[in-house]
Amino acid sequence: MVEQTVAAPATQRSNARVVGWCLASVAGMFAFGFAMVPLYDVFCDITGINGKTSGRYVSSDVAVADMKRTVKVQFLAQNGPDMPWVFRPVSRSVDVHPGEAITVSFYAENPTGRDMVGQAVPSLSPSEGTLYFHKTECFCFNQQPLAAGENTEMPLVFIVDRDLPSHITKLTLSYTLYDQGEPQAAVFKTTTIDNG
Amino acid sequence: MSAVADTHAQEHHHGPASGISRWLLTTNHKDIGTMYLIFSFTMFLLGGTMAMVIRAELFQPGLQIVQPEFFNQMTTMHGLIMVFGAVMPAFVGLANWMVPLMIGAPDMALPRMNNWSFWLLPCAFLILVSTLFMEGGAPNFGWTFYAPLSTTYGPPSTTFFIFAIHIMGVSSIMGAINVIATILNMRAPGMTMMKMPMFVWTWLITAFLLIAVMPVLAGVVTMMLMDINFGTSFFNAAGGGDPVLFQHVFWFFGHPEVYIMILPAFGAISHIIPAFSRKKLFGYASMVYAVGAIALLSFLVWAHHMFTVGVPVAGQLFFMYATLLIAVPTGVKVFNWVATMFRGSLSFETPMLFAIAFVILFTIGGFSGLMLAIAPADFQYHDTYFVVAHFHYVLVPGAIFGIFASAYFWLPKWTGHMYDETLAKTHFWLSFIGMNLAFFPMHFLGLAGMPRRIPDYALQFADFNMVSSVGAFMFGSTQLLFLLIVVKCVRGGEKAPAKPWEGAEGLEWTVPSPAPYHTFSTPPVVK
């Protein structure tokens, strides 16, 4: 039986080659699965889908506000699971002219008896407007530490781009605030600063 | 025609080892194929029992038999066991048995790895099924295990589920590598690629799909593992991740996976219909290209499973048209099968009955798939029983009927006996009626808005659900008849000739029935 079922050396060599190629493909596809994570972020960043607003905006030239056009920007604030803070926008909405820099603020209060750190994650709707909404200053760029019982007003400075498509008349910016735990531990646990 | 006339001189070989070590240590493709098929049928009965629990609960509105927590575990485990435990191993078993016989090879290219890839499977499913007895219960988040339901909110047994998936993935990948190496290196002299039997072609393409997507599945469950146990945030918005990303990665695996579960059935049907039509397969080359086209397109359509998460309009249009495009090569296949039957001299033995039912009912499942592919309409159908009806119409009369047709077609070759035709036809008709009774009303339930994966429903859905449950019980209990038929066929029956089917073609019919333990030690020459 043995001498008849054992493959010829030539077949064994090609078997080794096929197995080699297949294992390389398996490793490649496993890596591709993980590569989808950054690719997805880059793709969402470029296209603005998913309402992921980009990081800190640095304007290249001083734009003149388009005084003839008004866009309503609404603000929402909500808490992530098990987040006990009070979190709300100071004003529910503002009317802005595209091109002008607007400052608004959000109120946050830590009613608990322990020091905590929060992280706000923004989302813009409609997602088509994401590419035209620039934040030059945002509390969401950093984690927010609040001592027990402390409260604060957190600033947001933004510019609605003059190129905002004309059919968009209203933008809604929503923040979800997540508990990042104790102040010390939190620094090591997240890498979200540039996610903005 | 007897074995003596054969030139292989089996008398000089020693046969299988005796006792349990034959099965534990075997490297023989026929033994391993048999073990895969037995394992698959065991899992089919287990997953089917869970389906019976689901249908029993849904027999009437309200909660009667199980609590919602357990119901969710049943839907999840039913899906996982049927996909990874019943359908995929059945096709690997068929490949083990038939691919070497069809291409004139003495065994699989890598016999030892073959043994290993089988024995990993019982281990994986032992882990998966044991989660039912763990504190917090088995996975309960659906077979698609969407994050964060499976990460932040999953039961503690999720980690065991992840390891089980890892082991299954390794097993599938090793099986696929083996099939590719066998087909590429061990064909009989003269068998060029375009002379390969269709089943061999479809399995070659399926194996490539497995190699491409099983690592992605392994990747996505690894990310879950890290999110759950190591504090990463792949799918956790609080840490900068994104739950929608999970769905993208999962369906990048998931859509090719559905073709992995149907392409080998396409191949088997392409042998059975010509055999019982006594004609050559119509359009062999177009069949090969159609399978290749389906496999390539399967990588470009994954987001049609997730239109409702907020895909931009341009994306919806792309995925909608790409999905509709798959109907073209699939249509080529269906029309070729019909053209093969056209003006053939047909006879209706059980394999042919299952094959014809496959063509008709799979086409119905394909059409409901087209309805789901239309993005604006999908918002109505998404996550309703219409989806359940659709994928059961492609998986039950598609994959499962394809497996039954193959089993009846090749049983005489495997056992050396003819099966009981009367019992087999009874099995077919009861399965056919039961399956349609169970799944056809689900179309109406879905269109009327009944959501899937919920143990209770509104009163207006009661009648259709009762019909559906009756059909399911009928289909489920009928499968015990299949067990009886196979056991009877193994133990005795009319002696099968080397080629029991008049119109069948292929190298597997040139060896005696039952196929000797070692075949094609000297390769045959293909003209």
Image: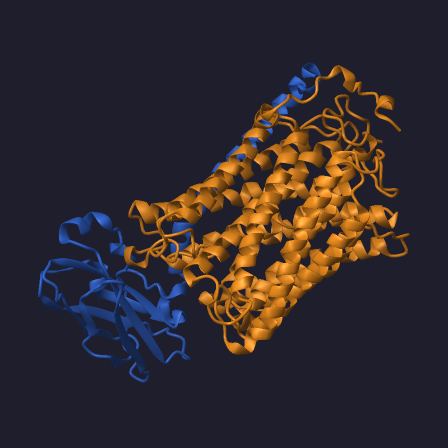
Chain colours: A blue, B orange
Residue at the bottom extreme, as displayed = A68
* Residue B344 seen in the current view: yes
Which residue is drawn at the image coordinates 18% and 76% (left, top)?
Answer: A90
Residue A173 horizontal/vertical position (percent): 30, 72
Left or right? Give the position of B417 relative to A59: right
* Residue B332 seen in the current view: no
Which quadrant of the rendered structure holds the C terminus of chain A?
Answer: bottom left
Total numbered labels placed on residues in the image: 0
Which quadrant of the rendered structure holds the N terminus of chain A?
Answer: top right
- In this view, the residue in front, B98 or B405, is B405
Q: Is residue B520 above or below residue B162?
A: above
- In this view, the residue in front, A63 or B283, is B283
Which residue is drawn at the image coordinates 53% and 68% (left, top)?
Answer: B384
Q: Quadrant of residue B309?
A: bottom left
Q: Is residue A180 above or below residue B285?
A: below
Residue A3 horizontal/vertical position (percent): 69, 14
Left or right? Give the position of B138 relative to B505: left
Left or right? Give the position of B220 relative to B47: left
Which residue is drawn at the image coordinates 66% and 35% (left, top)?
Answer: B34
Residue B129 horizontal/vertical position (percent): 47, 45
Which residue is drawn at the image coordinates 49% and 56% (left, top)?
Answer: B74
